[in-house]
Image (cartoon, rainbow, N blue to C red):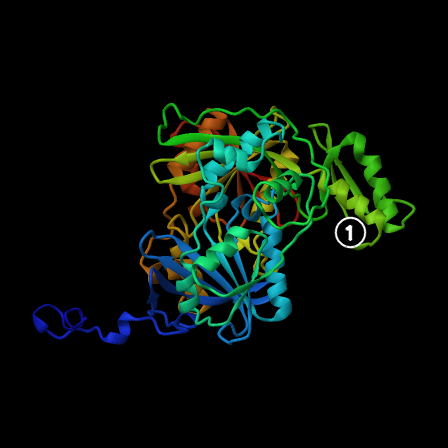
Amino acid sequence: MDALVNGAGGSPSRWDDESLVALPGSALGVGRTGAPIHGRLESMGSFPVELTHGTFQFHAFESLPDRSHVVAVSMGDIGSNDPLLVRLHSECITSETLGGCDCDCVQQLDKALSQIAQEGRGVLFYLFQEGRGAGYSNKGRDRMAVMNSGNKINTFDAYHAMGLPADARSYEMLSDLVHLLNISADLRIMTNNPLKLKALQDAGISYVRDELSVPSNPHNAHYLESKKAAGGHMITAQGEEVGTIPWEVRTFLPRRFEGAARFTHTATYPLPIRPPEGMLLIPASAVEAFKGLVMSASGEESASSLVGEFPLSSGEVLVEFDPSILEAVGPEKQELSRFIAKHPYWFNDHIYHDSASCRDFVVLEHSKVEREMPLVRVQSESYLQRFPLAPEERSTSYQRSVQAIVENGNGLVVLYPEDGGGHGFGAAFLQERFMREGHADSKEAAADLIGITQDARDYKALALLVKHHYGDGPVRLVFTAEESEDERLPLLLAIEEVGVVVDGWIDLDEERGCEASQD
């Protein structure tokens, strides 16, 4: 220690003993240049965020050995000695970002935050360990195999066939998190997973278990039953009818693109996506049945004032209804809810692994009317948007893009897998923190403060994915009104550079649908 503090040859150093050790509680309020470290984790600071359940504090940490991150979302005094309500939650891009309803992850996230808010005190650790630690590509291969079998095998069978452990997640960083957040209380863990409890026991952390159960739906019923039967999860059986898979799913060996060998196509499977509140896409033959359920649940003699119909060229009908109907109680409301749950928006979820950047790109494809000009939306990932943000914090650009593509009958959403303008989570968190703390008044100013460029996205990769799906085009791009010409130009140029014809674009309307724009 003396050699490290004094420097080579005993010369004075600007370091002192305290700078080498993280002080208890320091991660709760570090200055702009502070960065406490304990064990493998470095604190990146924190800032408050308004969620639908109240004001929470978002803390971020980076693992120095492997450059991964973990977020802690807290409320109240988590440093007191009273037993602390805690959730260990692993990310789920499918449900939290894309709105998929074939698992229960986003409902667990929302309910855990709700229960913390009800008590006024607790913390949720958000772990970037997709697919039970196997990654998004392997999670997609799992879903593809299960659907190909017609649900005759389960997720654990698929993982075993791929040579993967049933659960590869690690909770070793928890002791460092507890230290940096100055948590000394016993933990009340909200979980149904016995492996999480064993990990806490192995880490020597005292805990008791709190159950965390959420309702099932037709698209995740088989998955939840698999977790109970094969994974040992402590889930109460719910008896939900398993929904049907809308089209044949074929498995294939991962294969690289011709002409773009950086990409490996790892999986494709149908993903059921929750429609926006008050929207539904159903066959024309089911409209009258839906109206009948609406009248029964609302007590109205006519559904005309509660339901709007918009026939689409696909032969389906887009239905807009008053979502307050679902606030009713009784069996009529339950029947209506079941009907709605059986009719998600169906997209093909294509997953491409990029060996050049070590990222997984997700392309959602909706193709009901191939003769229509396909719409293409590039959507950048946002870790904050995975949480149930208050309306004034929430962006609806993804949901509006999905809605525009469904109405059009044909199109893609390409998810750019790095937040922070392509720089990654660390840059995104620091940008947000510095703006909220008043150190910068815009993302551009925050980027200058951090020392990064504003946009580091790989537009060539995005263009190659569009070309893979639509060849030479033509395609029509989808932008939000907030995106300037300078933000649109790099994508336009990259797509045209790979030989895809861009036939104009549309700006998403602030309400529902889209309006054409001139190019």
Q: Observer-nearest residue: 282 or 231?
A: 231
Which SS class for mark 1? helix
- Side (left or right) of 370 relative to 206: right
Compared with residue 208, is residue 129 higher up or lower down, i.e. above or below?
above
| Residue 60 point in image, percent of width and height | 43, 61
| Callout 1 amino acid | Leu
Please name the residue shown 21% across and 73% down the image.
15
Q: Quadrant of residue 101?
A: top right
Residue furthest to the left in view is 9
| Quadrant containing the N terminus in the rendered view | bottom left
Q: How many marks?
A: 1
Q: Which residue is mark 1?
A: 326
**Taking 474 as reference, is 87 above or below it?**
below
Q: Position of residue 378 (x, y in %)?
A: 49, 41
Q: Viewer-proximal residue, 439 or 197?
A: 197
Task: Give how far across and how far down residue 435 sits, in percent.
Answer: 44, 65
